[in-house]
Image (cartoon, helix red, strand yellow):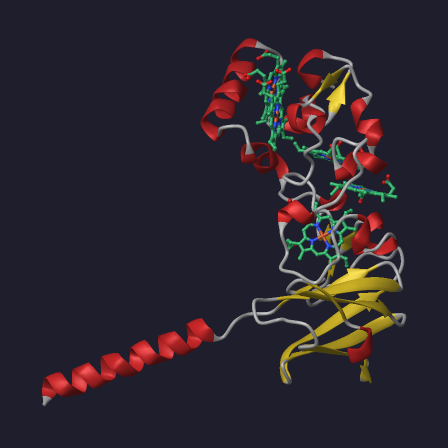
Amino acid sequence: MKYLVVAVGCALLFCSVMVNAQKKKISVSPPDKSLVSEAEVLVMVGGEDVNQDSVDIKLNNVDLRDKVRYLGSMAYVALTLNKGENRLLVMNNGQVEKQLTYLFQENEPPPKGYTRFIFHDAFLNSGCGDCHDLEMKPFDYKNIVYSEEAISLCLECHDDRLQAKYIHGPVGAGICTPCHDPHGNERQFLLTRKGNSLCEICHEKERIQKHLTKLQETKAGSSTSCLDCHDPHGTEKKFHLK
Ligand code: HEC
Ligand code: HEC
Ligand code: HEC
Ligand code: HEC
Ligand code: HEC
């Protein structure tokens, strides 16, 4: 009997774990409590069970279902925010998934609890089709489009990055997205990580630690921030030193 109770208990626990695992999460960008400095913004809603026509969005109680567009399993909608607080309700397959507040104000710093969200200019102003193949199919990195003349999508508009004499490896190859979010995020310059951890995406941590130690021992350099000495894109000096 005791074993049966334990067995049933375990089965119930297992079931509840299964149910939790099945409830798929929806992600919304910008996230809750974002401060934005433009009235016209784009909101993206993603998640495995997002599919054509499954998403409904209400902005300050106005239903925007007809305005929701889709790119694979990503839904997106253009919003015009009111000055001050805006309430967003995101539903998927008829269920309320998220309630968010966006604060639209220009220039002033974010009040407590809010984080500034920065949009990539091209994300807001040129539409998804400038960078993605818009046919309704699952998102695939191969469907990122760019003209044949440019080595990369990003350099089509930012070719000034290639003018320095000594160019950082990834920049020369037109690879920008390890360091920059193409759409928007909460970090200045759309950076994907903070501080030296940005460099650690590709440069081995131990090796650069040795590099810093060596610099401190042999040269005047006592700084520990990579960007104090190196430009991330390129300069006129070797090792793209500043
Ligand atoms: C400036 C170019 C650009 C624009 C504009 C753009 N994207 Fe992207 N997007 C990219 C790039 C580049 C990647 C791949 C990112 C990476 O390599 O990590 C990407 C990745 C994605 C992904 C997969 C990764 C993720 O973030 O979930 C989705 C979905 C997506 N974009 C949707 C959209 C939608 C929807 C729009 C329009 C509302 C849009 N994108 C506009 C460049 C762009
Ligand atoms: C259709 C043109 C276009 C494309 C394609 C494009 N950008 Fe931009 N980007 C802009 C414009 C316009 C600005 C705003 C003016 C500026 O800072 O140059 C901008 C700004 C930026 C900024 C500075 C943001 C800030 O807050 O200061 C970064 C970083 C950036 N882009 C990265 C990228 C990356 C990475 C890609 C490729 C995924 C890309 N861009 C593709 C047009 C473009
Ligand atoms: C190794 C990481 C890294 C890579 C790769 C990279 N960037 Fe940056 N980028 C940065 C950092 C860090 C900043 C912040 C400003 C600074 O320190 O120069 C920045 C700033 C920028 C800015 C805004 C400020 C400015 O200097 O005008 C633009 C635009 C930009 N990057 C575009 C690009 C493009 C386009 C590519 C790809 C061709 C690219 N970046 C590749 C790290 C990177
Ligand atoms: C996306 C990958 C990537 C990231 C992120 C990255 N690097 Fe690099 N870095 C490279 C590649 C690739 C090379 C070229 C290696 C070679 O030529 O042997 C390189 C080379 C360098 C060099 C040597 C240049 C030379 O002339 O030998 C320096 C300095 C450097 N990176 C600094 C940085 C700093 C600082 C950061 C962070 C802001 C950073 N890297 C982030 C990929 C990356
Ligand atoms: C105090 C200035 C200074 C700082 C801080 C600094 N570097 Fe350097 N770095 C240099 C100089 C100078 C060189 C030229 C070669 C040398 O002296 O080692 C160099 C060379 C390099 C090289 C190419 C040679 C090699 O060892 O492969 C890489 C890669 C590099 N740095 C990455 C980084 C990264 C990543 C950081 C941040 C953790 C960083 N550096 C911080 C000054 C600095």
From this view, report whether residue 117 is shown above or below residue 210.
Answer: below
Locate residue 142 relative to residue 208 in the image: left or right: right
Is residue 213 something that shows in the picture? yes
Q: Residue 109 location, x and y as percent?
A: 81, 56
The C terminus: image quadrant = top right
In the image, 234: left or right of 16? right
Residue 83 lies, with reference to residue 171, above or below; the image says below
- Which sits in the foreground, 140 or 23? 140
Count of numbered tags: 0
How far across and down, in percent of the image, does residue 183 sit?
A: 74, 51
From the image, which quarter does the N terminus lie in?
bottom left
Q: Can residue 31 be seen by looking at this rendering? A: no
Q: Between 136 and 68, which is closer to the camera in this rendering?
A: 136
Name the spot of residue 59 as percent of width and height, x first.
80, 78
Left or right of residue 239, residue 7 in this image: left
Residue located 89% across and 59% down the image = 106
Q: In what quadrant does ligand 2 lie? A: top right
Residue 216 occupies quadrant? top right
Task: Give left or right: position of 128 versus 209.
Answer: right
- Name the residue: 85% across, 37% down: 157
Coordinates of residue 61 in the picture (x, y in percent): 80, 84
Q: Nearer the viewer, residue 41 or 137?
A: 137
